[in-house]
Image: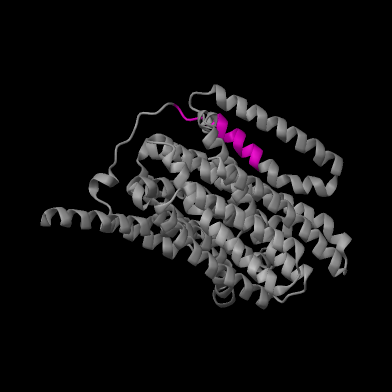
Amino acid sequence: MGSAESGTEVQISLTSWLSIALTLGCFSVVMSATTINVAITPMMQSLDIGPQVAQLFSSVFLGLTVVVAPISAWLADKFGAWRVFLGVLVFYVVASLAGLLVDSFSLLLVIRICQGICAGVIQPQSMFLLLECTPQSRRGRVLSLFGLGVVMAPALGPAIAGWAVDHAGWQSVFVLGAPPALLAILVAWVGLSKSQISDSRQQLQSFDWFGVAFLAALVAVVFAWPFVFERSVWLSGVCALAWLAACRAFWLSQQQRSNSIIPTALFAFPAFRRAALITFVYGVGMYGSIFLIPLLLQDGLGVSAAMTGNLLLIGGVALAGSISMAGRLVDRYSPKLILTAGMVSFTLSCVLFSVSTNLVVLTAAIAISRVGLGSIIPSLYSAMAQSVEGRQLRQVMSMTTFLRQGGGALGVVAIGVTVSLLTPLMGNNVEAGVTHYSGLFMILAGLFASGALMARRM
């Protein structure tokens, strides 16, 4: 009896160590996505580059996470999941530290490329390792801890980076993710057994390099499209149509390949298709709201930067509380119910943003939106994990990162272009500015309302 209890305690302790390591590892690479934004202005001055060139540090990172995410399942099967996780984190730390030693635009962009590749691998790797190491009865709570790290990373990143830029210079933003990554490596090394580190590898088919190159070209066009749009609206329209045709060609080619990087067979299942659409909508909403809320408050309503930060901090507190509670509710009830509630909450927040200019109401909307996001993460990933087994779990988690980041990329580009078009129309007219932002929030509300309907049918 005593030995059985002891064995249970060891297993729980091991799971806790690994959960912390995976969360820290993912936190470190996700934080890198937003820390660079704070350093854009001093980088432009120091490197003598324009704003569009400087934005490559952000767009290259996000684009590479989209391209690399589908490869993560293949890497795990080929070389062993824990080997890949630890090896990529070590590479990430080395590349980040190199950012302190170089001061040319081209070398810093190479370092940023390395960080984006690491982020594209670590995010899905962390998720499916977490799910594989956790009993189904505890997945909701563990995913809530993981989700808190993933969502808080882009929120805390700019604040930490701002302090670092003021006290240590703009190059310090390249290395901010290294300390949590090193801690993740240490914690994982303590929690892992030798058998887990040397987990079995599989004999796989040749790699789909054509698919990766095709996907990379599609992603590159998304980030290049705003530059084309600035020069010619008609040419940008032609490019958009050509891009859609290329997307269809890419999908058809993936269906015909036995070693495709996109597991097209998964989309034959209605439940997965709904979950995929919800994940895409979630990516658009999360990244879109992070972009739009400060614009509405500062540009639309004239709220100070300090007040905007305080209001967003309230949202962070709401997120921390809701995601912990949602994880426990997912373990006790159906993930579908919690997911639907989260989608409805975010829909309600977008409606409030679109119909009110009262700061009290907008503060409530920020809190409600973060409660929605906190409910979506553990419930969506739990529901997707329950519907598959074995290697499919790794493929699903890779697709989750791919769809979330892809939705975020398309959403940010579309919103950015829309705002740039509307800004000249706004002028100094506060009412016009608020009206335009309200319309964008209403579009997000419609997207999440459709997501809530899909969640009910999962």
Query: Where 404 falls versus 271 (above or below)?
Result: below
> Is residue 165 toward the left or the right of residue 258 in the image?
right
Query: Could you say where residue 407 lies in the image, as x and y percent from the top left?
Result: 63, 46
**Which of the pair 8/51 is nearer the observer?**
8
Query: Where 34 falls versus 168 (above or below)?
Result: above
Residue 209: in magenta span = yes
Give me the residue at 26% from left, 59% from top: 13
Residue 89: in magenta span = no
Give me the residue at 88% from left, 66% from top: 427
**Which of the pair 320/406 is nearer the observer?**
320
**Which of the pair 311/195 is nearer the observer?**
311
> Which of the 4 image quadrants contains residue 299?
bottom right
Query: Could you say where residue 455 lies in the image, as x and y percent from the top left?
Result: 56, 44
How many numbered marks appear? 0
> Is residue 324 toward the left or the right of residue 309 in the image?
left
Residue 90 appears anywhere in the view: no
Instruction: Report the quarter where the N terminus lies.
Output: bottom left
The secondary structure that dominates the magenta segment is helix
> Is residue 352 toward the left or the right of residue 398 in the image?
right
> Is residue 11 toward the left or the right of residue 297 in the image?
left
What stretch of residues is rendered in magenta?
Answer: 206-219
Query: Could you say where residue 354 lies in the image, as x and y percent from the top left?
Result: 75, 61
Give me the residue at 11% from left, 57% from top: 2
